[in-house]
Image (cartoon, rainbow, N blue to C red):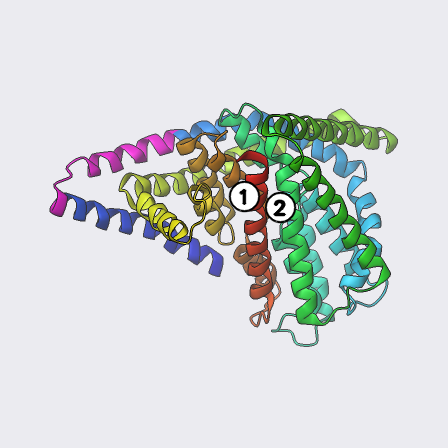
Amino acid sequence: MHAVMVLNWIWIGFFIIAFVIAVIKLVFWGDFDVFPAMMDSTFSSSKTAFEISLGLTGVLSLWLGIMKIGEKGGVVNVLAKLLSPIFTKLFPDIPKGHPVTGSIFMNIAANMLGLDNAATPLGLKAMEQLQDLNQKKDTASNPMIMFLVLNTSGLTLIPISILVYRAQMGAEQPTDIFIPILLATFFSTLAGIIITSFFQKINLLNRTMLLTLGGAALVVATVIWGFGQMDSILMNKVSTSAANIMLMLIIIAFILAGIRKKINVYDAFIEGAKEGFTTAVRIIPYLIAILVGIGVFRASGAMDMLIDGVKYGVEACGGNTDFVGALPTALMKPLSGSGARGMMVDAMTTYGADSFVGRLSCIFQGSTDTTFYILAVYFGSVGIVKTRHAVACGLLADLAGIIAAIAIAYLFFA
């Protein structure tokens, strides 16, 4: 509820601030074009939102169909088993063999595969089971907070929706941000784990965690070093080729998993594809609402003032300002997924899908998750009112993801 109210006031703020600035421009500067521009933006933004949603239908249905095959083929269960040794170290307060462990594994694995429809009910189930173990029913327990941070840090292996939006916005290679997102979301999740472990006095200096986190960090460092040795053209070709090969291997692996489980792969695909169509239709009003608000805000000149203000501050400190245009996506993401999605689309519309700002906004969108929304839904579902260090850990993980996204974007696309 709190996250919804925050988004409500942000949306109202777009219109109020835009109106005030437009009045000032009209009265003091004689700008008679500002109000017609604002009204034109409402119509054009509505049209853009509908066209995007309509265009999403086919590709979103395709990928959700593939994901349904993987889900029924047991891929989520396999990932859950692989993650088991790690998660027992991150949740020391959970009794060994407790059923909640399976729900946590399933939720995180579903999130990694981008199965949002499956991840949310699994997450709510896990939170209910964690509440059963909780001694103080109105206060978040340590396992609850660690579970929440793992969700808000946004660890995702397959950022389907972002790839779909880039394709719809005319990107030449929609998958060129695939590896940068993987790297950025890794740093966000790693930071979340370390920060939360510090608060909860969880010892990460054990063989399992050192091998896991150290090995993952070594792989990421190797990838960054390898790409750092290439020029921009070669880096883009290698990154895009690797991303496409990985995605194709995932599709083949999911189909083979379905065959191995002896499920009707075609029927599973159709079932998932129907969900894709429903999802594409369901987001139309949300996308129209946020894009119209942003459109009015931008047409009034308020967005330019905000960006110019941040740019001036960065320039005063001697920094590069190329990233500033994508910051609205990063600032909105902890508050609202649909709001950040609107900011991302707006950035690609304004600057171009293949521009530095357009690509960085996509990396921002994929590097973290909606902290306040997840906190409100998950904690609200079990009556938690005292969140302890959950917000601080979630936002610090978001900050790590934002910083990593900027650095990685400069490495790949500057």
Q: Residue 184 carries which label?
A: 2
The answer to whether residue 49 shows anywhere in this view is: no
Q: Earlier in the sequence, mark 2 or mark 1?
A: 2
- Residue drawn 45% across the image and 45% down it: 320
- Residue drawn 71% across the image and 58% down it: 126
Q: Is residue 284 left or right of residue 393?
A: left
The part of the chain drawn in magenta is: 27-47
Location of residue 26 by image quarter: top left
**Label 2 element class:** helix
Which percent across, then down, holds residue 358?
A: 48, 35
Q: Is residue 399 left or right of residue 202?
A: left
- Marks 2/1: CA distance? 10 Å
- Is the residue marked by circle 1 packed among few (<14), some (14-19), or many (20+) residues within 10 Å? many
- Mark 1 is on which residue type? Gln
Q: Name the residue under label 1.
A: 365
Using the image as rendered, state which of residue 16 and residue 5 is in the foreground. 16
